[in-house]
Image: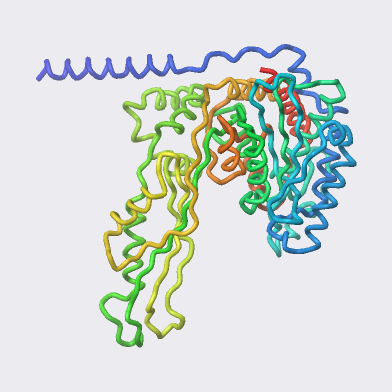
């Protein structure tokens, strides 16, 4: 007995030692000190800051709501925005005259600027932003601290629809190009800049028109950069610095209807199981058997970049995933935003059955929306549904679907350039590869690009994110300065390597 307890004690000590050593080895190396000049410029929001903010404020006043493109009034706003861009950025328009693209005749509202490179042997790159916006939900206007299309600027922020998503990136790109042109810069490789007009309704007319044009011209891009994440400040407990999540993939999309049939009749004489009962059974099974997932692949890469910066206790967990993997997975599953990183999500969203309270349903339908993780295929998810529901009385009808994107490289020269540029413009940011859980124009671009990256060079807090497609959308003046600087450095470096 004594021998056994000594043995156990020794094993426990060894275990603790292994955990401690692994945790120590997992610590982040000290980040290199930035040159003094960069630090000063990072802190400064003086004169350089005013122009991008003023221009963003003006851009917000055009109500370029793509969901309302059917209205003549909205199309007029688009035309006026395009005229305003030409008047505001005359150097860019005269040096790189944009091509107007759009698949719907009469709606050629996407602008593609081509900046020819010195070396035509090198593959070009594409920088993109969309200038269409989502509508303001009717009835919420009075909740905005500043009216949604005012473009008001206060001491720290520019307010209004599109401030974050995604007019700020469009303006940042135009400001950066203006400054580089003024210096007589010409990139080594060709740089395309696209400002698209219908991302919020699928990008089928804008980004897709850009892709078709590039295909016609026989262009294969080295990489593309578009929206899809930010520098996230205060999102991960225990992490002090903002995390630049440079997203290398985006989730796909699938909607299915689950349909159960019944004989109908009077509700006073129901059968043992109605169509609603059968359907409810299927939904419960689905809820109990989610798509498998966990911290591996892209999710693991992301945490490997971030976790070494965590305080000791948390770091010990991530450094010893062989021991604490289950604990970590269940903690991540507790929060909807981290759970979405780990697997395909399942969300029943719509239900319909009988037309009247006392009539038994002849058809009960549940609409279920899935966001497809790169590890899963659309066919695989439908198979999972069939296996889990295992009831031939429930039909599965597949509707809109789109596979997850490819996973782009986080080892490429382009990724390193993006990471380094983010650190240069934002000081001590942690850079991590990530996954965009919604859809962006990049799903079109990836068909003509070796790698596609999704990242906007602005720091956002949780409060800022609540304005994204929501109320009180805003961006800080400081972010506009840094975003302009980021794009300028990126074009300078990324397009010269
Ligand atoms: Zn967007």
Q: Residue at x 65, y 44 (%)?
A: 207
Quarter occupied by the N terminus: top left
Query: Toward which corner of the image does residue 216 lie, by quadrant?
Result: top right
* Residue 80 x/y as whole percent: 85, 51
* Residue 346 x/y as whole percent: 43, 52
Q: Residue at x 79, y 58 (%)?
A: 75
Residue 11 is left or right of residue 421, and the answer is: left
* Residue 232 x/y as whole percent: 61, 34
* Residue 131 x/y as whole percent: 73, 46
Colour style of the rendered protein structure: rainbow
Q: Is residue 351 above or below residue 450?
A: below
Quarter occupied by the C terminus: top right
Q: Residue at x 32, y 15 (%)?
A: 17
Task: Pick the residue in front: 21 or 173.
Answer: 173
Task: Pick the residue in front: 413 or 284.
Answer: 413
How many numbered markers are drawn?
A: 0
Query: Toward which corner of the image does residue 182 lie, by quadrant?
Result: top right
Q: Is residue 213 above or below residue 312?
A: below
Q: Is residue 146 above or below residue 45?
A: below
Residue 263 is left or right of residue 432, and the answer is: left
Q: Is residue 285 above or below residue 228?
A: below
Residue 327 is left or right of residue 163, and the answer is: left
Query: Toward which corner of the image does residue 259 lie, by quadrant?
Result: bottom left
């Amino acid at each position: 007995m004594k021998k056994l307890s000594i043995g156990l004690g020794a094993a426990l000590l060894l275990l603790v030692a292994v955990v401690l050593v692994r945790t120590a080895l997992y610590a982040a190396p000290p980040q290199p000190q930035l040159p003094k000049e960069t630090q000063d410029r990072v802190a400064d929001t003086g004169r350089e800051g005013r122009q991008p903010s003023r221009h963003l404020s003006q851009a917000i006043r055009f109500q370029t709501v793509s969901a309302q493109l059917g209205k003549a009034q909205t199309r007029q706003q688009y035309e006026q925005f395009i005229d305003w861009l030409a008047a505001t950025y005359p150097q860019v328009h005269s040096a790189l005259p944009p091509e107007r693209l759009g698949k719907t005749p009469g709606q050629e509202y996407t602008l593609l600027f081509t900046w020819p490179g010195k070396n035509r042997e090198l593959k070009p790159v594409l920088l993109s932003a969309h200038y269409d916006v989502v509508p303001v939900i009717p009835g919420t206007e009075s909740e905005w601290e500043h009216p949604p299309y005012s473009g008001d600027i206060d001491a720290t922020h520019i307010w209004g629809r599109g401030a974050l998503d995604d007019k700020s990136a469009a303006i940042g790109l135009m400001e950066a190009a203006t400054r580089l042109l003024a210096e007589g810069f010409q990139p080594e490789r060709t740089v395309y800049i696209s400002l698209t007009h219908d991302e919020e309704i699928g990008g089928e007319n804008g980004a897709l028109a850009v892709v078709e044009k590039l295909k016609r011209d026989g262009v294969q891009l080295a990489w593309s950069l578009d929206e899809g994440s930010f520098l996230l400040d205060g999102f991960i407990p225990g992490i002090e610095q903002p995390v630049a999540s440079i997203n290398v993939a985006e989730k796909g999309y699938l909607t299915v209807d689950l349909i159960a049939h019944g004989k109908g009749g009077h509700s006073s004489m129901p059968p043992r199981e109605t169509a609603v009962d059968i359907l409810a059974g299927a939904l419960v099974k689905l809820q109990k058997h989610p798509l498998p997932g966990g911290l591996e692949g892209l999710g693991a890469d992301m945490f490997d970049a971030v976790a070494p910066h965590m305080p000791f206790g948390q770091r010990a967990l991530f450094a010893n995933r062989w021991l604490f993997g289950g604990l970590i997975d269940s903690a991540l599953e507790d929060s909807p935003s981290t759970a979405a990183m780990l697997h395909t999500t399942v969300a029943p969203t719509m239900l319909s059955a009988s037309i009247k309270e006392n009539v038994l349903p002849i058809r009960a339908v549940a609409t279920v929306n899935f966001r497809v993780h790169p590890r899963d295929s659309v066919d695989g998810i439908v198979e999972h549904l069939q296996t889990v529901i295992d009831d031939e009385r429930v039909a599965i009808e597949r509707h809109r679907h789109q596979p997850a994107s490819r996973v782009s490289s986080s080892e490429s020269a382009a990724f390193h350039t993006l990471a380094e540029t983010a650190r240069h413009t934002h000081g001590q940011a942690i850079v991590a590869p990530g996954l965009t859980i919604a859809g962006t124009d990049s799903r079109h671009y990836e068909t003509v690009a070796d790698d596609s990256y999704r990242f906007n060079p602005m720091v956002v807090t949780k409060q800022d994110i609540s304005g994204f497609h929501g109320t009180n959308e805003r961006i800080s003046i400081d972010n506009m300065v840094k975003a302009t600087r980021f794009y300028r450095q990126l074009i300078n470096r990324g397009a010269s390597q």
